[in-house]
Image (tube, rainbow, N blue to C red):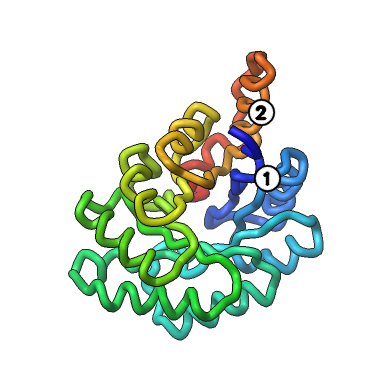
Amino acid sequence: MDDIPDRIEHTVLGPTTTPDDVRTCLDEALQYGMRACIPPCYLPLATEYANVPLTAVIDFPHGQGQTDSVCQAAKLAWDAGADELDMVCNVGLLKAGADDAVRDHITEVVASVPVPVKVIVEAPLLSDDELERVGQLVADADAAYLKTATGFSEGGATVHDVEILSKYLPVKASGGVGSWADAEAMFEAGAERIGASSGGTIVREWQAETEGESPTEPERERDDADTTDGY
């Protein structure tokens, strides 16, 4: 596999995220050639601090905002320097069978900005039938990617979910991906991107495997962050 670092979105999204946490995330992204995924409030800091491709989360983590407000948040994040946006699907509406409302909401948000929009579908909360439905809805809404999970609900990315979603759009696998072995399994299942707070660990382990070496210690940037940071 080529260009692994560029396919990793190194992430810090927890409720206690500080400016220093964001700087550390950006430092690691620069060091290893990764992208970064951060809260939108830190976009001005990030664009001044480092030249790193930036994703900002929108309507995170529940996806229950009104369409106009989510569109406005998307525009503000783009204006502040986001290269891509990750918005959250309204899972409650999906489960209620309001497919038109789900699709129309996503369509308006996608159309409101000229940058790629990924849609987080919270796959751990969905049945296979619901995954198939939401995959088609998001594709019909002209989003750029499907994304597995916020990490703030029940579980994270699975090979099974990635296999289903990748039939519809490129997939960003997020939630509990903490090692190169985890990431490789997601890539082999069809994922195009990985979202992880352990991005540096993933890249180091990938580099060691590529070079035929073994890492001296399996490091984790923010070991507890896979539960507290949403990844």
Give the residue at x 54% y 53%. 14
How would you rate the neighbour count of disc 1 (Cα within 10 Å): few for under 14, some for 14-19, many for 20 or more?
A: many
Give the residue at mark 1.
34
How would you rate the neighbour count of disc 2 (Cα within 10 Å): few for under 14, some for 14-19, many for 20 or more?
A: some
Relative to 213, 194 lies left or right: left
In space, the residues marked 1 and 2 are separated at their CA atoms by 12 Å
Q: Quadrant of residue 39?
A: bottom right
Q: Position of residue 113 (x, y in %)?
A: 57, 77
Q: Position of residue 163 (x, y in %)?
A: 34, 42
Give the residue at x 72% y 50%. 26
Give the residue at x 49% y 41%. 226
Q: Nearer the viewer, residue 131 or 149?
A: 131
Q: 29 above or below 52?
A: above
Residue 207 visible? The answer is: yes
Relative to 192, 164 lies left or right: left
What SS does tag 1 mark?
Answer: loop
Residue 62's disc is none
Q: Amino acid at mark 1?
A: Met
Give the residue at x 79% y 56%. 50
Q: Are marks 1 and 2 in contact (CB under 8 Å)?
A: no
Q: Amino acid at mark 2?
A: Arg
Give the residue at mark 2.
204
Relative to 176, 40 lies left or right: right
First of labels 1, 2 by sequence position: 1
